[in-house]
Amino acid sequence: MTRTKKTGMKAWGGRAAVVGALGLASVTLAAVPAFAKGGVDVTAPHTAHVGKTFTVKAYGDDDAAGYLRVCLDSRSAGRAWHRVTCGAVVDTGAEARVTAHVKAAHRGAQQYRAVLYGLNGPHDRHPVRERTSDLVKVDVR
């Protein structure tokens, strides 16, 4: 009889500990700040012909910065990244966009990426890189 009583008390104490731990976990999760939401994407054709012009577009948004700007970078043959162009500075909540018309000068593969920068003001001279898109490859034939 004593054994049954002890087991019952131990089971009740274990349940109370689990309920208390779950309550503490839910309060802790509610106090953690939310992470910034956003993304950046770039689009370009898969192939292009030498001497012809093709369009590369990028857009992105992020709610972590007051102002946003998206830029396009390119490289070919594994060289360093070079800035193609940048879009206008926009307020958070609006989507930053940029469009570049690129003339394919020589054969080979060209890679493009979009970089989203966060700014403190519309004339901020020290933007912070927020996000970088996946690479897009254009085969010039």
Image: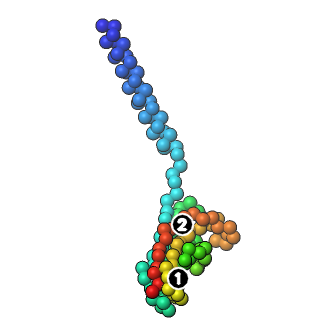
Give SS at disc 1.
strand
Q: Position of residue 1 (x, y in %)?
A: 30, 7
> Is 65 rendered above or below residue 44?
above
In the picture, measured across the screen, residue 54 lies left or right of residue 130, that is left
Q: Position of residue 92 (x, y in %)?
A: 55, 66
* Residue 55 visible in rendering: no
Residue at position x 52%, y 45% in the image: 32
* Nearer to the camera, 56 or 23: 56
User: How many residues crowd mark 2 within 10 Å: few (<14), some (14–19), many (20+)?
Assistant: some
> Is 52 rendered above or below residue 116?
below
Q: Which residue is mark 1?
A: 100
Q: Quadrant of residue 4?
A: top left
Residue at position x 36%, y 13% in the image: 6
Count of marks, rendered view: 2
In the picture, measured across the screen, residue 138 lies left or right of residue 79, that is left
Q: Which residue is mark 2?
A: 132
